Image (cartoon, rainbow, N blue to C red):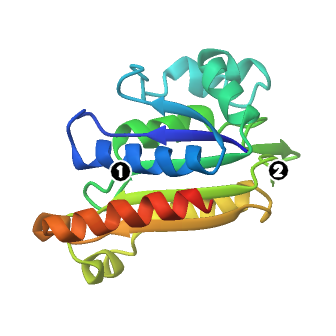
Amino acid sequence: MRIHYLYAHPLEDSFHAAISRAARDGLRDAGHQVDFCDLYAEGFNPVLSAAERRGYHEVPANQEPVADYVRRLMEAEALVLSFPTWCFGLPAILKGWMDRVMLPGVSFKLEDGVASPNLLHIRKVAGISTYGRPRWTAMVMGDPPRKIVTRYFRVVSGGRAAVQYHALYDMNRATEHQRATFLAKVRREMAGF
């Protein structure tokens, strides 16, 4: 499959960089074609401008400011989102990608004020994240990142995409063994994606 891999971490030497390498290795081992989108390295601007918001409903002109990102998403058959959880949410750069790229005419069609799914070509979605706190804390907070990946992307794919989510909770206290185990799990899961 053609996989669009969205990566959202600013540090090249982070544990998340190791996660993205393990995931991409697994995907390539399985023979997938990976379009790696490092939002920080590409200098993606996460801010939805006033002009973009005014033209939000003007399909296809609304896509012009992010045309290459839209093209990459529309060419994909699967999507992987790899990100740390910060303040129980997505990193701003990834949230900004969603605000600016998941537009009418892209992720959904808007007809007579009614939204319908438009990413019907996306067959699989995976989220890979880390949390500084234990899972119970994320659950108390409602675990928004997990819900965005497992619910929102299921909706915009018309329920067609198989969705999986892989998280390492309590990262602040994770041992070297726990981190290595998670990297191996990510590579194995992506090899079977």
Answer left or right for 131 relative to 97.
left
- Answer yes or no: is residue 144 visible: no
Q: Is residue 191 above or below residue 146?
A: above
Answer left or right for 100 relative to 2.
left
Which residue is at 50% across, 40% downward?
6
Which residue is at 38% across, 40% downward?
8
Residue 168 x/y as whole percent: 31, 68
The quarter of the picture where residue 87 lies is bottom left
Answer left or right for 23 relative to 112.
left
Which residue is at 76% across, 55% downward?
123
Q: Which mark is residue 110?
A: none
Which label's residue is closer to the chain start, 2 or 1? 1
Amino acid type shown at disc 1: Ile
Q: Is residue 98 above or below residue 174?
A: above
Q: Is residue 49 above or below residue 169?
A: above
Amino acid type shown at disc 2: Leu
Residue farthest to the right, as pictured: 112
Which tag is nearer the camera, tag 2 or tag 1? Answer: 1
Quadrant that contains the C terminus: bottom right
Q: Is residue 135 above or below residue 13?
A: below
Q: Say which element carries label 1.
A: helix
Residue 5 x/y as whole percent: 54, 40
CA–CA distance in space, label 2 to label 1:
28 Å
Answer left or right for 172 relative to 84.
left
Which residue is at 13% across, 64% downward?
172
The quarter of the picture where residue 125 lies is bottom right
- The residue that disc 2 covers is 120
Determine contact: label 2, label 1, CB under 8 Å. Answer: no
